[in-house]
Structure formats: C-alpha cells, structure tokens
Image: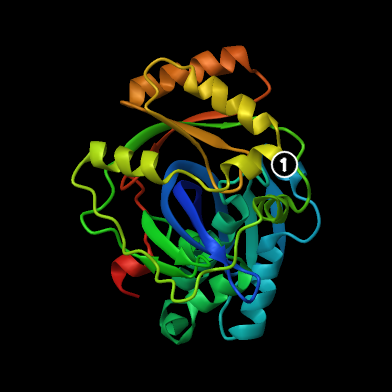
C-alpha cells in the first residue's frame, strides 16, 4: 500500500473563553479555532512494521510516551481491524507551545489511518478516539476553522466560513512546566459553572473587520494565567504589540505562543523579519490562518 503524508497544522485559538469549572473538574469553554499553513507532518506506511519514529528540529523535545504511541495503542485496542503500520513524525512545531502540536499529530494520524482503511472506516467512532486522546484532538482531527465548546468535544461549523488572516506566531522558547496546561488552569482558578449554562451559538462573520472586532471583544481568558506560569509570554506580547501595522495580539491556548494579526502577507513577513533580527532565540513564523488549508475534514464531508 502507498504511504500517506498527512499535514498536522498548528492550531490557533483566535478566542478562548472559560465559562467555569464543571462538577467533574473539567472546564467548560468556548473557542474560535483556526489552523495555520505550517505544522508537523505525519507519514503512515500501512505495509510496514508497527513502529514510530521522529525527526525534525523539535524531535529532541519529545520526552516520555509520544501521543502517537498512545494513539496507535488506542487504535489497536478499540479498532483492531484497522491496519496501522509504520508511523514517522516530522516535528516542526515547538513542544508544549499552545498551538496543539501533539493534538495535531494525533489528528493527522487518525486521518491517515482512516484513509488507508476506507472500507472499514464507517464502523469506527473517530471522534470518540480523538476525545480519548485529549481535549484538543477532536478539533485537530477536523483541522479547519470551527467553533469549539463543551470541553473541546462539541464542534460546529462557522456559517459563511472564516475570513482568512495573516499572522505572526511567536514562541519565546522559554522553559515550561511539564504540566504547563494544568498549571495555567490552576492559576486561573475558574469559578464553578453556573447552573443552567448554555453554550453560545457559533458566530457569523460578514467580513474581516467583523472577525477582528469579535476577537478583540472575546480575547483569551487564560492570558493572565499563562503569563504568570511562563513570564516570557508577556515579553512576546509586548514585542508583537510594538510592531508597525499589527491589528491584534493574543496568546494561543495556554501559551506560551502568542500571535499578532497583520493586514496582509507582506506586512506579516516584514514583522517576522524584524522580530527575527531582534530575538534570534525565539521561534517565529509568518502564517496564513483560515480557509486556506487544503485539508480533508470529517465534518465538511459529513463523515
């Protein structure tokens, strides 16, 4: 069988609101999620032995049990009829960065396995597998702009789509706690979810200006806690906010990666160059966000 290369794009929380802490200890959220045109790459050779290998600039940052190992084990347990084979990950995204790198890798592997087992794919609960692997894996399985609510498990299409954005992603490459996301949520100290809470409906955007206004109004409720856990996050925010032409700056997810939105591709690239000259030790990338990603999501196809 032919090998499949699946793009695992960086996930960006354009907005992230925490409604409260549920009785089960999980957090109820509402987030507008987009994906970048950069990311990791997962290659699946369904005819090869059951092995997982990693290469790329951030391969050495992966320690312990890789999420792809967990995904392969879960597939074997819940869907043993599916052929998996040899998996190789090209790790281009920083680890524990707030851009869903591991979740994107897991989503890419699930998509690749689905493609190589097309005849048996309809009998598999792909979203159930994704939920079992982590809160961000369901949206990364889809890998296109969506409105995410619940604990990350409820996904909805954005009527009319998402106007494309050009942005610069910046990670200070600072040391982060092993349980960084849990630390951020503990620092947040969210109140219990109010009785009768109902998740907000998916937003609709007539144009780019409406989208930016929505982002400015909603923001990221984890921003202050993220900076408290990794103080360098605030340094990045200040550096992005000082760049000419920047229209909006925010933290993605639980950080420490932040993003700045710019009017067009050339402005984003110019900003990337300035920051790269000033901060050579940071990870910096100019990206496109929105409907520009030629991926094959499950919801779009209805499968």
Q: Is residue 265 left or right of residue 143?
A: left
Position of residue 24 measured from the top left corner of the image (x, y, whole percent): 64, 76
Residue 243 lies, with reference to residue 163, above or below; the image says above
Q: Nearer the viewer, residue 17 or 196?
A: 196
Q: Residue at x 58, y 56 (%)?
A: 105
Number of callouts: 1
Q: Is residue 129 left or right of residue 226?
A: left
Task: Please say whether residue 167 is visible from this viewpoint.
Answer: yes
Residue 195 lies, with reference to residue 44, above or below; the image says below
Q: Residue at x 42, y 16 (%)?
A: 270
Per the image, label 1 sits on a secondary structure element best described as: helix
Image quadrant where one finds the C terminus: bottom left
Residue 36 lies, with reference to residue 4, above or below; the image says above
Q: Residue at x 61, y 74 (%)?
A: 132
Q: Nearer the viewer, residue 56 or 9?
A: 9
Count neighbours of disc 1 (C-alpha within 10 A) and say few if under 14, some if 14 to 19, many if 20 or more: many
Q: Which residue occupies the extreme right position in the image? A: 64
Task: Please say whether residue 1 is visible from this viewpoint.
Answer: no
User: How is the protein colored in the picture?
Assistant: rainbow
Q: Which residue is mark 1?
A: 229
Position of residue 41 measured from the top left corner of the image (x, y, whole percent): 55, 49
Position of residue 210 measured from the top left corner of the image (x, y, whole percent): 24, 41
Position of residue 239 measured from the top left corner of the image (x, y, whole percent): 55, 20
Residue 99 lies, with reference to residue 47, above or below; the image says above
Q: Quadrant of residue 268?
A: top left
Q: Residue at x 50, y 16 (%)?
A: 273
């Amino acid at each position: 069988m032919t090998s499949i290369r699946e793009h695992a794009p960086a996930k960006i929380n354009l907005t992230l609101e925490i409604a409260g802490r549920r009785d089960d200890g999980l957090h109820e959220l509402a987030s507008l999620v987009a994906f970048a045109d950069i990311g990791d790459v997962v290659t699946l050779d369904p005819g090869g032995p059951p092995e997982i290998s990693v290469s790329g600039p951030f391969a050495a940052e992966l320690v312990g049990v890789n999420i792809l190992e967990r995904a392969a084990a879960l597939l074997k347990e819940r869907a043993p009829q599916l052929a998996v084979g040899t998996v190789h990950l090209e790790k281009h995204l920083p680890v524990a960065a707030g851009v869903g790198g591991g979740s994107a890798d897991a989503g890419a592997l699930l998509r690749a396995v689905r493609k190589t087992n097309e005849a048996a794919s309809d009998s598999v609960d792909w979203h159930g597998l994704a939920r079992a692997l982590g809160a961000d894996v369901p949206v990364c399985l889809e890998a296109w702009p969506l409105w995410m609510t619940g604990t990350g498990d409820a996904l909805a299409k954005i009527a009319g789509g998402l106007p494309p954005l050009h942005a610069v992603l910046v990670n200070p490459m600072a040391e982060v706690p092993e349980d960084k996301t849990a630390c951020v949520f503990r620092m947040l100290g969210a109140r219990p979810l109010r009785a009768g809470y109902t998740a907000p409906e998916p937003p609709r955007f007539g144009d780019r200006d409406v989208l930016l206004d929505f982002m400015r109004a909603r923001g990221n409720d984890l921003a202050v806690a993220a900076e408290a856990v990794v103080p360098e996050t605030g340094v990045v925010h200040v550096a992005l906010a000082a760049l000419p032409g920047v229209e909006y700056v925010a933290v993605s997810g639980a950080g420490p990666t932040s993003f700045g939105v710019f009017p067009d591709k050339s402005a984003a690239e110019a900003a990337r160059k300035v920051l790269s000259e000033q901060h050579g030790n940071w990870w910096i990338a100019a990206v496109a966000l929105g409907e520009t990603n030629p991926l094959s999501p499950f919801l779009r196809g209805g499968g």
